[in-house]
Image (spheres, rainbow, N blue to C red):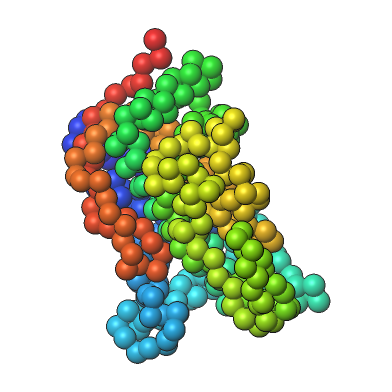
Amino acid sequence: EYFSKWGNEGVVDIKYELEHLIILTASRCLLGREVRDKLFDDVSALFHDLDNGMLPISVILPYLPIPAHRRRDRARKRLAEIFANIISARKAAGKSENDMLQSFIDSKYKDGRPTTDSEITGLLIAALFAGQHTSSITSTWTGAYLLRYKQYLSAVVDEQKSLMKKHGEKIDHDILSEMDVLYRCIKEALRLHPPLIMLLRSSHCDFSVTTRDGKEYDIPKGHIVATSPAFANRLPYIYQDPDRYDPDRFAIGREEDKVAGAFSYISFGGGRHGCLGEPFAYLQIKAIWSHLLRNFELELVSPFPEIDWNAMVVGVKGQVMVRYKRRRLSID
């Protein structure tokens, strides 16, 4: 439905299109029917202001009185009002929906205290941010690499043809799970360009760390421990030719993401606090790109994009212009 507004052929900024599409899908899946059907334009604009208020300086001085922070705080207040009205309406009507919002409304703490409207608002904002921002960035990088390296574009198109021969036009969760080639292409784009380049944890006790070359570091309780996926994902003793886009490094027989153990690949974090949304992210991105590959011929017409290091969540700098032409993928 989203791509029906495209003509038979033309040029689009695929970065913008994917950002807009994924906030639509994420809002419906994570925020509930009311937001998607009736309030999407309002919530989308407010989320944009909230997102633009997350700057590197915000980590150090979160309440610095600058315009971006003022707009962020106004957006947060308005979002709280919108969600409070939705929550009240659901409770008053006695309706129960099958979505994340309902799960938050019904949730209670271990002591029996119900979750407050303010807490629900914070959880919903965090869920939408996690479900939209990083997925749209990774979708854009995936597309840029596929259109740059024709051998991988041909491989994912052939995979789609094979699945269409087997299942017809149908796409569901099980069929998406069969898209191993596309999965590896997404995973490799995410290895090279993790949106979160720094992961922070607080030390709850004193402990020591021994590095690969034998150096030992004492980490005191209460200190902040940081790791960088942007650095760790390119370690040459784990990944062969680490700066090269090579999705087959994850194929059976190579599996470079397991060379150094469970934390060889940390684009989604790891351990107890690994990203809970990892399956949802892959599901979204595979669904979108399988549709594009089946229905359009695509060509990258702008230069290969650069990295936007100025953003809090590191993404794609500038526009990513793509020429498209409608087609029905032939399986003959």
Task: Name above or below for residue 201 compared with residue 269.
Answer: below
Quadrant in the picture for the C terminus: top left
- At x 60%, y 60%, the residue is 213
Q: What residue occupies the far top of the structure in this picture?
A: 332
Q: What residue occupies the far front of the structure in this picture?
A: 214
Is 9 situated left or right of 74 in this image?
left
Closer to the camera in the image, 212 or 53: 212
Quadrant in the picture for the N terminus: top left
Q: Quadrant of residue 307?
A: bottom left
- At x 54%, y 62%, the residue is 127
Residue 66 in view in this figure:
yes
Closer to the camera in the image, 154 or 96: 154
Q: What residue occupies the far right of the structure in this picture?
A: 111
> x%, y% of residue 128?
49, 61
- At x 38%, y 61%, the residue is 314
Q: What residue occupies the far bottom of the structure in this picture?
A: 65
- At x 32%, y 79%, the residue is 68
Task: Name above or below for residue 286 compared with residue 133.
Answer: above
> x%, y% of residue 295?
34, 28
